[in-house]
Amino acid sequence: MSAYADPHPKHLLDFHDWSTERLNAILDNADTMSKVLDRPVKKVPALQGLTVCTVFFENSTRTRISFELAARRMSADVVSFAASSSSLSKGESLRDTIETLTAYKIDAYVVRHSASGAAHAVARFSGKPTINAGDGLRAHPTQALLDAYTIRREYGELKGRRVAIIGDIRHSRVARSNAELLTRLGASVVLCGPATLLPRDLAGEGVTLTTDAKAAVKGADAVMALRLQTERMDAGYLGSLPEYIAGYQVNEALLEDAAPNAIVLHPGPMNRDLEISADTADGPRSRVLKQVEHGQAVRMSVLYHLLVGRG
Amino acid sequence: MSAYADPHPKHLLDFHDWSTERLNAILDNADTMSKVLDRPVKKVPALQGLTVCTVFFENSTRTRISFELAARRMSADVVSFAASSSSLSKGESLRDTIETLTAYKIDAYVVRHSASGAAHAVARFSGKPTINAGDGLRAHPTQALLDAYTIRREYGELKGRRVAIIGDIRHSRVARSNAELLTRLGASVVLCGPATLLPRDLAGEGVTLTTDAKAAVKGADAVMALRLQTERMDAGYLGSLPEYIAGYQVNEALLEDAAPNAIVLHPGPMNRDLEISADTADGPRSRVLKQVEHGQAVRMSVLYHLLVGRG
Amino acid sequence: MSAYADPHPKHLLDFHDWSTERLNAILDNADTMSKVLDRPVKKVPALQGLTVCTVFFENSTRTRISFELAARRMSADVVSFAASSSSLSKGESLRDTIETLTAYKIDAYVVRHSASGAAHAVARFSGKPTINAGDGLRAHPTQALLDAYTIRREYGELKGRRVAIIGDIRHSRVARSNAELLTRLGASVVLCGPATLLPRDLAGEGVTLTTDAKAAVKGADAVMALRLQTERMDAGYLGSLPEYIAGYQVNEALLEDAAPNAIVLHPGPMNRDLEISADTADGPRSRVLKQVEHGQAVRMSVLYHLLVGRG
């Protein structure tokens, strides 16, 4: 029996309850949504009369707008609840907030929070379909889905593909979610970064670790650079920026031993000429803007699945 | 002849111009709106093509979202004008702001302001249907309507019911609006709090005052706890929190002499274990989340009445 | 051959690429939009399925709401991107932001920025129809269009009309855009202000300069007062406020030699009794609220033209 037994998971908090079949269905349906986005009138009535609430405790305008547009393009109403402008600052608890919103008859939640597990809490308090849009260092499942979708669009399938993820692995929910999803879908993943930023416990079936970027990239079909938070240096995780750049910047020299048509990914926003060289970021290998575009199709697919596709 | 002579009041600023018949019509219509909210597609075209503007000079995400959803569920467009992000900070007057918005052809206003009378000013400057969503210490009529509606849903009618309101009566527009509305609808009201927080001039027909919470609650069908602003202590209105809790916290011990099925209300957000005990807040008597839910139905009813129901 | 050769300009950044014929078509179409705004249901399906993004790097609630309502009244979806709440504060570049939004399939941009040329940059990065809602000291074309439309509504046409613009000409994109547009449409323009605030290079065909407000207003059909930023005094551009008021305040005494039915304009928000007297601001000559109202019709016309009217 599968460890992912729920045939119709109610939430997308991480991939634990999700069967591989269902994850592939999300990606298949994103193809349909992509076609909607290619039409002049980019709107369908699928979620007419439903209300999606974005609950962002961390500021992320990009991700919020991506979800908001995904919902509105399926004719849902969207309400935005920004923690900073709310009575949470008056000491109201997360539970009270979510119970109040749920009494307003919100149909689904999209949650971003700096604390791992916050999206699980929202799902529990609301009892409504909840999408984790990033919680602490734990998970960011729609980012991983859009990365997987971007690679799939390039190669037809994930099976047998080799993906290198390079940078501050330790503090990256993107790396964690990608490592889990990509291996589930049949790819192999190499996580690479300075030893201080590369937690040993992430190694597992299909996931290898290395501090050698050249080795990580060798033969890779896709190379993902992670955003470097320069605050990490103050915390002692990193030496100097020049050292980091010399060892781990994704650039044309590093990509020499990658697969000939290897693509380059980045979750954005990019620090050009820090974790990625400007010419690679804007060059022919880059799929960074495709990731953004596919993110909307994938989020439409997830919202559709959770709100109307389970019946 | 009634003191509330206007058969079709244009605004809901307080209850002065409203006949009891019309107030009951609002509550009757809230039943219809509640049924809309119970449907899978919670949307009707009643206000299609109309634009409602929320003008909030005090931050209240809960109340703003409640009105916004009420309007959008009747297919109105909603524009939010938050004073902090506006040119009011450049010294623009309230009058200029409202006249400008009115020139944009806004169809109705929802106003929250820390100054008593601000909603009246908006009604005068705009000439458009205006709903007071709380002005200073004066009035919060939709809160009172949702409280009345919640009690009515419980008991069928307000007539003959006894309602105790406990806490900082002095600084509560909720208490003022409730005392007026509930007595108009045939209930009797007991206002209760420490002497410093209990203005003598609120006593009147159907409204009694007491500093003794046990006496207030005796035989009550509904008990409302008011949020305690701890700032009041610094201002000398209150002794210590333990004293306040001992005397005025709404909890199971206090409720012993209430009517057997007495319900508990709170305008939210609650300070659990301060003005209300956590077990009462979350226990079987609590209608706190029902209040939130009914608030949306009542606000839909008010918006409908003012925008299309007067013809 | 005309200097304004493009028969179908893609953007409205300034008036350089716009033929006079096309500018008149925008104003003609604003008449149609005005009629929509006079109907009880102020909404048409013209932009159904399209998404307009307002990108405001300077705070201007009035202008943003005017564009937002213009778009929504034609059934477009609107996304607001406020620079302060975005990752631009994390050092993300304007280019990255616009490329990201464009990958979300935004159909048109409305841009406000303190830097001259920012709207041109957005047009270049996005490749999508872009409207300049004010960039630095350079241009504010929809403000000039609404001013021209307001004068045209009054007099039937601009040809032969004399317009005086009084105040801080140096720091006013409104004055620059108006001088260009009004002369293009056949009016003559007098720019007037203290010598320190009156750049000599603005004189040109149909545009005269003077420091004498009495002379500027003489025979004028329309007199526009500009908002005075009191910060200018600290910068040494101005003497005292009483001096400014005595020389340049638009008031009934100054208007004595204007055309008998001369109208008064102001881009708002007004400093009453500074650059304009309160009685003139609120008197029968004032068209200030008409400007606001016409602004919405003109912006609807511009959005319609750029998004669907070019085909």
Image (cartoon, coloured by chain):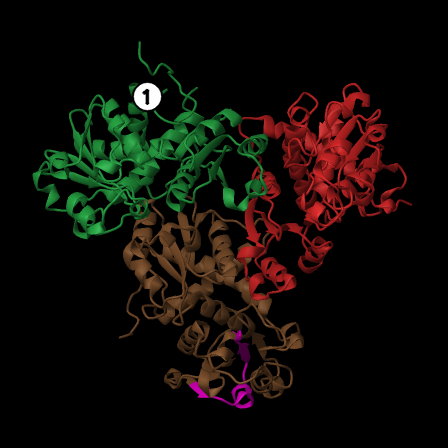
Chain colours: A red, B brown, C green
Residue B190 vs C284, above or below: the answer is: below
Residue A27 visible = no
Identify the residue at image location x=10%, y=37%: C258
Picture coordinates of residue C162, whole percent (x, y): 16, 30
Which residue has dot 1 on it?
Answer: C22
| Horizontal side of residue C230 vs C134, given as left or right | left
Q: Position of residue C9 (x, y in %)?
A: 40, 20
Residue B204 appearing in the image: yes
Give the residues drawn in magenta, as a range: B208-230
For this rendering, which residue is in front, B283 or C123? Answer: C123
Q: Is residue C211 left or right of residue A87?
A: left
Residue at the image position 35 percent from the left and 52 percent from the top? B90
Q: Percent x, y for residue B234?
A: 50, 78
Q: Nearer the viewer, residue B69 or A134?
A: A134
User: Residue A100: x, y in percent?
Assistant: 59, 61
Q: For residue A269, which quarter of the picture?
A: top right
Instruction: Say what secondary structure mark 1 lies in.
Output: helix
Q: Chain of mark 1?
A: C
Identified at 42% across, 78% down, the residue is: B183
C253 in the magenta segment: no
Taking the magenta stretch, the answer to whether it contains residue B226 is yes
Q: Residue at x 24, y 34 (%)?
A: C198
